[in-house]
């Protein structure tokens, strides 16, 4: 059953409302399945935009949220604090590399990025340096949908073209994969040094930009060059954080400690909206002052919502008590084996796997509507975009469900790919 009434009042994400088929109505979730109103059960290949790392409805998280709901669903964070936030901040600081110890909570990934950009810009002002407000970002990147975040997304994206007059102008470079690109990055950093506040990167994977991978050495090069030019590095781990790439945080694979890190998506195990911008001590110290105006000027209404913090604490418990990183490794092996069947077929440009991320890239944009329909016919929830089909399942996905997802890709993709070539 589809939900046509949803056209009347609901405005849907990234959707041409006039053309899009009506959305499917979900009535329940469990494990790695989404239950539809007509009783069908879809195997979820996306984990709800990469959030539900422990699968849906994990009883430990549900219990923690229910307990917190009974005690205190929300209280303002100005002038007040509470145990769920205190505990979560301390645990994140302990898990994150280096002295990433200062946690600023917000309620979405985009806002965590806004706070990171603001933090970097104000850090310079607080140090008495003016004119440093721009950010160096990488082509292919995605950092969110709010204005500041949009300004550091790939500049060729439609949103940039449309909102060009509205967005701050940033500096864009290619990821430094080659010697020439490394030199170009170094030169751009030198040329724009006086106006730059920070460098921002999605470590190891540019997610929404097309699941584009880069090796840890490239990330290490970015960190080294940012340091050489005295610029803070912002690592946007909103997609990569919490096991997705096979390590708890992607930065760990390069052995780097960014100056500011953004977290969201899987932070609450897919339960509630929550995000964090985490700063190293040197950044935090730029705000530590006798001057009230040197305070970080941000504070969302639902900052550090206790329910969301309770969910996040419960999610971290599960990373402690259950073998999530091993599960990510097992998913990587199964994806590598399973998707290899598609390698070299006409119309297929590339197959990529990192941790619990598998992506198949076509040589050109495929018929997305036909692909989506074919996946749905196999009762799997897979959402191709641009020229890729990808899987980012729950880290807890049962083997049989993962095999069903892979089998669906292997069955559906060759026909669609052949039509391109
Ligand atoms: C999803 C995402 C964001 C934006 O997060 P929202 O919660 O959707 O605002 C930012 N950066 C990256 C890398 C993301 O994947």
Image: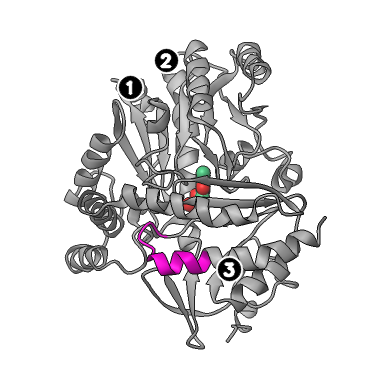
Residue 397 magenta-highlighted: yes
Can residue 80 be seen from the camera position used here?
no
Residue 43 position, x and y percent, is 48, 71
From this view, report whether residue 268 is shown above or below residue 168.
below
Task: For label 3, count other residues whose C-alpha is less than 10 Å away and answer few (under 14), some (14-19) or many (20+).
Answer: many
Q: Which residue is mark 2?
A: 127
* Residue 63 drawn in magenta: no
Q: CA distance from mark 1 to mark 3?
A: 60 Å
Residue 138 placement (x, y as % from top left): 62, 31
For marks 1 and 3, the one nearer the N-term is 1
Q: Which mark is residue 9?
A: none
Q: Relative to 164, is 39 above or below?
A: below
Q: Is residue 149 above or below residue 378?
A: above
**How many other residues sit within 10 Å of disc 1, few (<14), some (14-19) or many (≥20)?**
few
Q: Are marks 1 and 3 in contact (CB under 8 Å)?
A: no
Query: Looking at this view, is 376 or 60 the one in front?
Result: 376
- Where on the picture, by quarter, is residue 142? top right
Q: Secondary structure at mark 1?
A: loop
Name the spot of residue 180 as percent of width and height, x first.
68, 17
Residue 166 visible to the viewer: yes
Residue pointed to by mark 3? 408
What's the mark number on residue 291? 1
Residue at point 36% right, 54% down? 302
| Residue range of the region highlighted in magenta in the rendering | 394-405
**Helix, strand or loop at mark 2:** loop
Q: Residues within 10 Å of mark 2 (few under 14, many from 20)?
A: few
In this orientation, which residue lies closer to the viewer: 249 or 192?
249
Q: Earlier in the sequence, mark 2 or mark 1?
A: 2
Comes first in the chain, label 2 or label 3: 2
> Residue at position x 21%, y 39% from top?
90
């Amino acid at each position: 059953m589809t939900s046509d009434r949803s056209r009347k009042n609901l405005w849907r994400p990234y959707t041409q409302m006039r053309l899009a088929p009506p959305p499917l109505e979900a009535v329940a979730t469990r494990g790695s399945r989404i239950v539809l109103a007509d009783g069908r059960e879809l195997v979820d290949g996306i984990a709800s935009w990469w959030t539900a790392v422990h699968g849906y409805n994990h009883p430990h998280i549900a219990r923690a949220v229910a307990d917190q709901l009974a005690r205190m669903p929300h209280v303002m964070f100005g002038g007040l604090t509470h145990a769920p936030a205190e505990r979560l901040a301390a645990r994140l600081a302990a898990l994150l590399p280096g002295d990433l110890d200062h946690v600023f909570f917000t309620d979405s990934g985009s806002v965590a990025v806004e706070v990171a950009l603001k933090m970097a810009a104000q850090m310079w002002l607080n140090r008495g340096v003016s004119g440093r407000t721009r950010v160096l970002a990488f082509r292919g990147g995605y950092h969110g949908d709010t204005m500041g975040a949009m300004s550091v997304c790939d500049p060729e994206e439609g949103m940039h073209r449309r909102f060009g007059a509205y967005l701050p102008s940033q500096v864009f470079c290619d990821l430094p994969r080659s010697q020439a690109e490394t030199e170009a990055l170094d030169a751009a950093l030198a040329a724009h040094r006086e106006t730059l506040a920070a460098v921002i990167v999605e470590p190891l994977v540019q997610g929404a930009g097309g699941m584009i991978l880069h090796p840890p050495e490239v990330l290490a090069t970015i960190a080294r060059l940012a340091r050489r030019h005295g610029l803070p590095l912002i690592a946007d781990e909103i997609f990569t954080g919490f096991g997705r790439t096979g390590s708890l945080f992607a930065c760990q694979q390069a052995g780097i400690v960014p100056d500011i890190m953004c977290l969201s998506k899987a932070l609450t195990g897919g339960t509630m909206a929550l995000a964090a911008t985490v700063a190293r001590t040197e950044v935090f110290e730029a705000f530590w002052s006798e001057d009230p105006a040197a305070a970080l000027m941000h504070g969302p209404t639902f900052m550090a919502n206790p329910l969301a913090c309770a969910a996040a604490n419960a999610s971290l418990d599960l990373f402690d008590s259950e073998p999530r990183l091993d599960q990510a490794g097992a998913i990587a092996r199964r994806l590598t084996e399973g998707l290899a069947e598609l390698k070299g077929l006409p119309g297929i440009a590339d197959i990529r796997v990192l941790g619990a991320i598998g992506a198949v890239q076509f040589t050109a944009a495929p018929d997305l509507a036909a692909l989506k329909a074919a996946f749905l016919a196999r009762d799997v929830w897979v959402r191709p975009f641009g020229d890729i089909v990808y899987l980012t399942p729950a880290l807890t996905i049962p083997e049989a469900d993962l095999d069903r997802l892979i089998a669906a890709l292997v069955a559906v993709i060759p026909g669609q790919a052949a039509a391109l070539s």
